[in-house]
Image: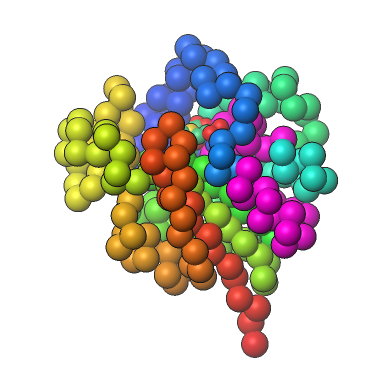
Amino acid sequence: MENKSGESEFWESAFTDKQEMWGFEPAKSAILTRDLFVEKGVKNMLIPGIGYGRNAQIFRDERMTVTGIEISKTAIEMAEKHYGADMVIYHGSVTDMPFDDRQYDGIFCYALIHLLDSGEREKLIRDCYNQLSDNGYMVFAVISKAAHTYGTGKFISKDRYEMFGGVRMFFYDQASIHAEFDQAGLFEISEVTENYPFFLIKCKKQERA
Ligand SMILES: C[S@@+](CC[C@H](N)C(=O)[O-])C[C@H]1O[C@@H](n2cnc3c(N)ncnc32)[C@H](O)[C@@H]1O
C-alpha cells in the first residue's frame, strides 16, 4: 500500500491552490451514468472520490440520495458550500472502505480508481461490489492508454506512471479492464472523451439465487 498521508496532502494542496479546478459542469460520464441510473430506478448512491461535488448534483436533481467519500477536507467544505450540508460525505481514503454498513443501488466512481495501486484497485472494486445491493449498478470512469500522457512521466510499474507533480496513474485498456472487473459483474465498456480519453465501465450485481 502507498502512503495515504502523502496522497491526502497532494489533494489537499491541489484544492487549496486551485479551488474548483474542474468548474461546475458535470463530466460527460456523470451525465451518461445519471441517465442509466434514472432508467434503472436507482434511489441511493455512493460517489467515492466525490471531490467538491460537481458530479453529484445531477443525480440529486433526480431525487437520488447521494453519499460521498473524499480524502480532502477542503473539497468537502467546498461541496458543503456549493451544494448544501445535507449531503453526507465521509472524510477519508477509499482504501479504508467501508465507511458505513449500507447497501447502495448505484455507485459512480469518476477518475479515482486509476490513481490507486493494483492491490488498492482490487480492494476498491471488491468493497464497492460488497456495498452494492442485488441488481445494483456500479460505474467507473477511468483514463485510457489512448491518452497522450500515457507512457510519459516516471515509470512505476506496467501501465502506471507518476506525473503532474506527484500523481500516479494507471492507464487502462480492454485487457486490464476485463482482468479487474470481470469478477465484479462487468457488462459494458464504452469510450468517452473527457479532458482525456476515458473508458466507462459498467457492472451489475446479479441477484443471488
Ligand atoms: C481526479 S479527481 C476527480 C474528482 C471528482 N470525481 C470530479 O471530477 O469532480 C479525484 C478525486 O478523488 C479524491 N481522492 C484521491 N485519492 C483518494 C482516496 N484514496 N480516497 C478518497 N478520495 C480520493 C481527490 O481528492 C479528488 O477529489
Above or below 157: residue 167: above
Above or below 181: residue 146: above
**Applied colour scheme:** rainbow
Q: Quadrant of the C terminus?
A: bottom right
Which quadrant of the structure image shows residue 79?
top right
Residue displayed at 60% across by 42% down: 30
Residue 50 sits inside the magenta stretch: yes
Above or below 137: residue 13: above
Q: Which residues are magenta?
A: 31-57
Q: Residue furthest left?
A: 155
Residue displayed at 29% across by 22% down: 165
Residue 76, percent from left and from top: 63, 27
Q: Is residue 124 visible?
A: no
Residue displayed at 61% across by 48% down: 32
Which quadrant of the structure image shows residue 26?
top right
Residue 130 sits inside the magenta stretch: no
Direction from residue 33 to residue 40 in the image, left or right: right
Residue 28, percent from left and from top: 56, 39
Residue 148, percent from left and from top: 27, 34
Q: Is residue 114 visible?
A: yes
Residue displayed at 44% across by 50% down: 191
Direction from residue 177 to residue 206 in the image, left or right: right
